Image (cartoon, helix red, strand yellow):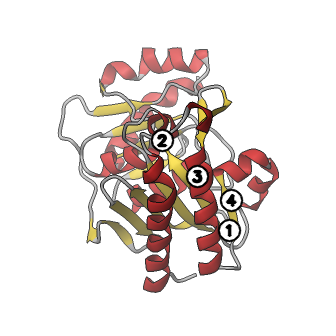
Amino acid sequence: MALSPALHDGVLAVLRQAANRAILPRYQHLGAHEIIEKAADDLVTIADRESEAILAEGLARLLPEAAIVGEEAAFADPSLLNRLGEALCWIIDPIDGTHNFAQGKPPFGVLIALAEAGETIAGWIYDPLTQRLCHATRGGGAFMNGERIAARTSGSAPPVAAISLIYADEARRAALKAHITPHYQLVDIPRCAAEQYPRLALGENDLSIFERTLAWDHAAGVLFLNEAGGLAAREDGSPYRVDDQRRGMIAAASPALWEELAGRMEVFKE
């Protein structure tokens, strides 16, 4: 489907509404009872739930025919994941970087994607603290605060890499440390995809390896980086799809950096 300027403006209005009504008033003002560990090292706050409710309601008004899959709704009802491949589907991460948000520190953000038959066709990445908006449409380029953006590398040697080991099993973690990390200048992961993808486009980081690739975390960012001229794809080179439940992905500020890292990861297949 073609995305109209009116739809983009509507999504931005809904994002700001969620930020101003549910997220910012709770920032650094959460009570202990308002932070819940829903799984090991996986938090949810009252702000996440309130934000998702606002976003789901607003997006449903903008495009009533689209399914809606939100992170918290899918946690409560995993069968919602079956809707990711429908003709049209809104995908919501009401607060990406909840771990940071719950600690009262940045970065955190809001992620919204629109998928068509499993392929992301539009994505929005919003930082409530700075009001930075990154967005992209399939074939339409990537933009930051309304200005077209082209991904650039850091120029560092060795390249700068943020490699997530949190969700890797022990064997994969050991393999990454032995065969991959020695070739790169490592930096801490921000624990926030809404921050990591802009860092790759802005030349702050050159590479990232993601183990867990849930649609609400990655759909918007993958499209944004690819439309900016970087490359995010599965480790075998196949495109990221929101209805693909596989783990593992490489994201890079340039296709050449992606190819170099993917080549090094061939050892994992031996």
Residue type beneath disc 4: Val
Relative image position of residue 33 (x, y in whole percent): 62, 34
Residue type beneath disc 1: Ala
Establish if 6 lies above or below 259. below
Who's the residue at 23% across and 28% down the image?
158
Crowd tier of the residue under label 1, counting other residues whose Cα lies within 10 Å: few below 14, some 14–19, many 20 or above = some
Q: Are marks 3 and 4 in contact (CB under 8 Å)?
A: yes
Who's the residue at 45% across and 45% down the image?
193
Relative image position of residue 149 (x, y in whole percent): 27, 63
Measure the alpha-carbon separation of dots 2 and 1: 27 Å
Residue 241 seen in this snapshot: no
Crowd tier of the residue under label 4, counting other residues whose Cα lies within 10 Å: few below 14, some 14–19, many 20 or above = many
Residue 217 left/right relative to 256: right
Q: Are marks 1 and 3 in contact (CB under 8 Å)?
A: no
Q: Are marks 1 and 4 in contact (CB under 8 Å)?
A: no
Q: Could you tell which of marks 1 and 3 lies nearer the N-terminus?
A: 1
Residue pointed to by mark 2: 97
Measure the alpha-carbon separation of dots 1 and 3: 16 Å
Who's the residue at 44% across and 61% down the image?
20
Who's the residue at 43% across and 49% down the image?
194
